[in-house]
Amino acid sequence: MTGPISPSSLNPKSSNNALSFPFDNSYARLPTAFYAQQAPVPVAAPRLVAFNETLARLIGITPGEVEDMARVFAGNDLPQGAEPIAQLYSGHQFGHYNPQLGDGRAVLLGETVGTDGKRRDIQLKGSGPTPFSRQGDGRAWLGPVLREYVVSEAMHALGIPTTRALAAVETGEDVLREVALPGAVLTRVAQSHLRVGTFQVFAARGDVQNLKTLTQYAIARHYPQANGPMGLLRAVRDAQAALIPAWMSVGFIHGVMNTDNCAISGETIDYGPCAFMDSYHPNMVFSSIDRGGRYAYSNQPDIVVWNIAQLATALIQQFADKDEAVEEATEIVHAMPALLQENWLRNFRAKIGLIREEEGDLELISDLLTRMAENQADFTNTFRALAGERARDQFTDPAAFDGWAKNWRLRQERENDPKRVMKGANPAFIPRNHRVEQMIQAAMAGDYSPFHRLNAVLARPFDAQPEAADLCHPPSSSEIVHATFCGT
């Protein structure tokens, strides 16, 4: 474990420019056991490549000059009121417990309360080493920064709870992975960065007092109606039970659903080796490090139940009567699969134009998915085409679709406006993996036009946008992305 490494000559300066953050920090007022004070490490030549003005207005940030914003979002200048810290947490990584993780390459500048009344963290990701870096360089390279910017903003446009991207900055420095790559910093915005692993670290240490403090803080910040630790567990369970079916309804695979990547807020967090499916298959895996398929597409509901069980185990440690707490927690966790199924069915009913709940709907949806897998049907394009006349063209054997569609059309006769429902549930555009990779390669060559085009199109995923029809196309055989990678 390394300590803060930036010498005084490299410490960020307090910013006197026009860029204004209305900071109202609460996490930094928690006991120092929760974090390490850590300023971002300045970079050589910051250059702003993206700034999310819509999000900035929401969280109350007044933009400044481009050069000033580049320095602030690179970590070279600290906005007035910032209290930079690296947060402590632990977590299960691929089922194995790591007793201390923490922000190894991120610094929380502080929090703002937006125009919508919601409190949000503002975090620099790739901002240099922290006491939790574990011999890492604390930096990010350009590819993962641009991927997270595009994918997180696309998820927001799809209506799926997610962290968001405020800015991306080139650093003017290389970072060394297998080869030297251009460095970058992402400014990430989240309702908080509290994770299941944040609770696990104090539970594992037997630090009951700080576990209680954290529980009270999480309830006050996210679920003020929750009644005590079990009320918090129930609220987080419900939020995650809504999130994962929403992912699945757009073919999203998180890729690394470790407990340190499971947010208490119910937001999608940490877009590392994530991907969206092209051809549907329930066992699809993209992450290069998921060799056993633990986080495959169809395993995501089971994994989130496992993650919430780890949260329950941590929360129980603060009870004097653990037997009673175990009984209640077990009941809460055991109810989760039914909630996931209920939410999954609601999402997928809408995808085939159904609102009413009827016996046989699960079998109807499952039959379609089975036929899609057998016929290499594109997930996004097949569901989008259901509102038109060309869905059968997505199947290698169109008769496979016809055999399903007869029962589907009979079922739709009992619905009011199935086409409207389908158009609202099935996007035309997702961040297809090959387009994201092409965008990254172009940016590395200095061309950011594909990056900006993707952001513009993906901001309206349910609109037809015929001028962007090429972004709907599945990859050719030479364009298929078989594996995605973490940014570390």
Image: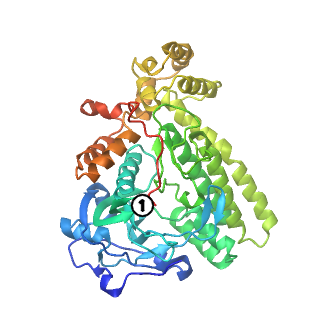
Q: Position of residue 141 (x, y in %)?
A: 37, 60
Q: Which residue is mark 1?
A: 177
Q: Is residue 263 visible?
A: no
Residue 218 in which image quadrant = bottom right
Q: Is residue 128 above or below residue 401?
A: below
Badge 1 density bin: few <14, some 14–19, many ≥20, Cα 10 Å: few
Who's the residue at 57% across and 53% down the image?
A: 257
Q: Quadrant of the N terminus?
A: bottom right
Residue at the right extreme, as displayed: 323
Residue 203 in which image quadrant = bottom right
Q: Looking at the image, which is closer to me, 346 or 372? A: 372
Q: Position of residue 111 (x, y in %)?
A: 40, 70
Q: Is residue 142 above or below residue 423?
A: below
Lateral position of residue 32 relative to residue 6, left or right:
right
Who's the residue at 56% across and 57% down the image?
A: 262
Who's the residue at 59% across and 72% down the image?
A: 214
Q: Looking at the image, which is closer to me, 316 or 132? A: 132
Q: Position of residue 42 (x, y in %)?
A: 31, 75
Q: Secondary structure at mark 1?
A: loop
Q: Looking at the image, which is closer to me, 380 or 59? A: 380
What amino acid type should be assigned to the residue bearing mark 1? Arg
Colouring mode (rainbow / by chain / secondary structure / one colour): rainbow
Q: Position of residue 477 (x, y in %)?
A: 41, 30
Q: Is residue 361 above or below residue 178?
A: above
Q: Is residue 324 visible?
A: yes
Q: Looking at the image, which is closer to me, 396 or 299? A: 396
Residue at the front extreme, as displayed: 179
